[in-house]
Amino acid sequence: MHHVIVLELVNLFCSGILAGSLFLIHYGVRKPLGTLEDRPQIQLRQSLIYRLRVLIPAVFVPTVLSGVAAAILDWSGPGSIFRSVGALSALVCFLTTLAGTAPINAAVLTWQPDAPPKDWRLQVSRWGRLDAARTWLALGSLALMVAAMAFKPV
């Protein structure tokens, strides 16, 4: 059973990094980014996407896999309902990214900073709504995983 606890601790670590990263992107970067003029805003968005399109999945994948594995391996243990819902929340967060923000990010990389598409602000606005959803899903997942660990016997 020690391997399950190690897996849960790995998940907490990854969940914390993911939730913190998405929180920082949503509340620390998104608003100031939106205050820039069109050209520098698009250039900075593209630069951030190039940098984060490797980093975020590198955290997302172990977060989701360790969460789902822990939920399956300890499906009837103390706090299992919190762990299961937390794993589901992480999975929905991942799917929101995969089907929502990632396609928009891919489109942003094709934009010409001096001649963006006419609807670029609408796309950025949609990205912001999806980003808010995935940020709160990641934060909820982290909170649920912490709650699940609180039920573990000492």
Image: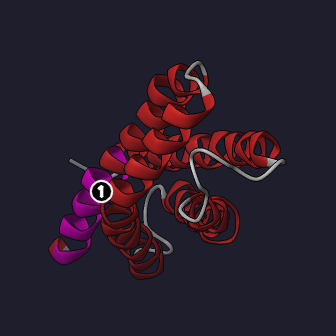
- Helix, strand or loop status at disc 1: helix
Q: Classify residue 89 as left or right of residue 59.
A: right
Q: Which contiguous range is marked in magenta?
A: 3-16
Q: Amino acid at mark 1?
A: Cys
Q: Classify residue 17 as left or right of residue 129.
A: left
Does the stretch in magenta take in 14? yes
- Residue that mark 1 sits on: 14
Residue sitting at 38 percent across and 73 percent down?
Answer: 61
Image quadrant in which you'd find residue 91: bottom right
Other-residue count near label 1 (Cα within 10 Å), few / some / many at <14 / 14–19 / ≥20: many
Residue sitting at 52 percent across and 27 percent down?
Answer: 33
Q: Residue furthest front?
A: 114
Does the stretch in magenta take in 151? no
Residue sitting at 40 percent across and 63 percent down?
Answer: 53
Q: Classify residue 94 as left or right of residue 127.
A: left
In this view, the residue in front, 33 or 115, is 115
Residue 47 on image: x %, y %: 38, 49
Residue 38 on image: x %, y %: 62, 32
Residue 44 on image: x %, y %: 44, 40
Residue 87 on image: x %, y %: 52, 64
In this view, the residue in front, 78 or 50, is 50
- Please tell me how many numbered marks the rendered image carries: 1
- Magenta stretch: helix, strand or loop mostly: helix
Q: Is residue 128 above or below residue 77?
A: above
Q: Is residue 56 above or below residue 146?
A: below
In this view, the residue in front, 59 or 116, is 116
Q: Specify the quadrant that holds the N terminus.
A: bottom left
